[in-house]
Amino acid sequence: MLDLDSVNLRSCATRMTQEDENQEPQQEDGPPSLTIDHKNDIYPFCIVWTSIPVISWVFPFFGHVGIGTSEGIIRNFVVSRHVCEDSFAYGSPDRYVQLKYQHACGWKTGWDNAIEEATTIFEEKKHGSIFNNCFTYVCTALNLMKYDEKTNWNQFKLLLFLWWNMKYVSKKKIITTYIPSLIICCFLAITGFMIHESIQQSENNMNDN
């Protein structure tokens, strides 16, 4: 388990000494662009989510997540010892939430440094379904940048945060996200009804005899 107290938070080292801590650190390139480009999967300062075939059909609240750099490049941890860049697993994002980079220690620079450090850490880790997965990768980045002055982000907190704040990319994405689940629910309901009717019919036949 990552001991955040022992990790050198490089993102915080970028913060300059200021009289007003709320003042933006000097950025050589000026304020970063916050423009989201759904067509080209550009999501600056965003956490993105997409459904996982079969798993998300049965459990719609489960999916795959990634985090966008200041330039909107999506980073996501999907296989052991490798963090994908600009290639979001399972297709384009279905939902997203754009965070406030000003809430990261070091602002834009701190945001990117935290993602880089999280990437370095997870390039040494084996991917798992429960631990060391895409959620823990994003949580590690948020903890390293001390987003919202917190270092206790975990999978459960992130899941709740995302479900409360995420927006769908389009109306089509809403349909493609939930239609498989509705089909499965309808199939199970019809199957259950038919089994129940069959049992009832069998019991009636036995009583008649």
Image (tube, rainbow, N blue to C red):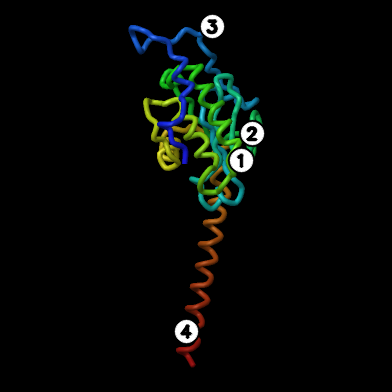
How many other residues sit within 10 Å of disc 4, few (<14), some (14-19) or many (≥20)? few
Q: Determine which of the numbered discs, if any, sits on residue 84 in the image.
A: 2
Q: Marks 2 and 1, how far apart in space?
A: 7 Å
Residue 71 percent across, percent down from the top left: 58, 19
* Camera-side residue of 103 and 190: 103
Kindly identify which residue carries mark 4.
204
> In front: mark 4 or mark 1?
1
- Which residue bears the numbered disc 3? 28
Q: Name the N-terminal-most of marks 2 and 1.
A: 1
Please name the amino acid that badge 3 sits on: Glu
**CA neighbours of label 2 inside 10 A, class few (<14), some (14 to 19), many (20+):** some
Looking at the rendered structure, the secondary structure element under dot 1 is strand
Q: CA–CA distance between discs 3 and 1?
A: 33 Å
Q: CA distance from mark 3 to mark 4?
A: 82 Å
CA–CA distance in space, label 2 to label 3: 28 Å
Disc 3 secondary structure class: loop
Residue type, mark 2 in image = Cys
Answer whether labels 2 and 1 touch (C-beta < 8 Å).
yes
Q: Which residue is mark 1?
A: 78
- Which mark is first along the chain, 3 or 2? 3
The disc labelled 4 sits on which kind of residue? Asn
Residue 187: x %, y % from top left: 56, 60
